[in-house]
Image (cartoon, helix red, strand yellow):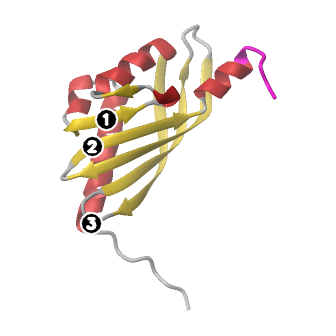
Amino acid sequence: MPTTAPALPPHASDDVEIVRAFLEASMKPDVERAASYVASNFKLTFTGGRTYDHPGGSIGFNAKRYRWVKKSMDRFDVVPGVDETIVYSIGTLYGEWPDGTAFEDNRYIDRFVVRDGRITHMDVWNDSAERILVRNGIEA
């Protein structure tokens, strides 16, 4: 007999929309709008272990790493908790490297902790470093 997954708490779908809005603002990039979705104790751990306490940190880093970059947000996985919701945004990056060379299908996973309607933590992983190695002739 098939079973159905338990319904998500009402706030969980709101938390996904907070994450989606944050990511859309970050891609524009609209630093102030992105910052409006984060808590005062926000901590972002970016690729390579870089840490920031404001969305402007990663947005500024991306401005050096890419000419431009956007996300195809394929899905959101939600892990509801009592006091917080964990939201994973999973998809691919596309854009241009600083030299203008286009790229696409660059996998990413972003993990968010949302508490009381604000993002408190974000962890970022993607394949950009691997792509850069390949572009420089370094492959396994």
Marked residue nearer the N-terminal end (2 or 1)? 1
Measure how far apart labels 2 and 3 are at the Cα level.
15 Å
Residue 117 point in image, percent of width and height: 20, 50
Q: Residues within 10 Å of mark 2 (few under 14, many from 20)?
A: many
Residue that numbered label 1 is attached to: 43
Q: Is residue 66 visible?
A: no
Residue that numbered label 2 is attached to: 120
CB under 8 Å between discs 2 and 1 = yes
Residue 64 point in image, percent of width and height: 46, 12
The quadrant of the rendering that contains the N terminus is bottom right
> Which residue is depicted at the point 28% across and 53% down?
15
Measure how far apart labels 3 and 1 are at the Cα level.
21 Å
Q: Residue furthest top?
A: 99
Q: Residues within 10 Å of mark 1 (few under 14, many from 20)?
A: some
Image: 124 above or below 101:
below
Measure how far apart labels 2 and 1 are at the Cα level.
6 Å
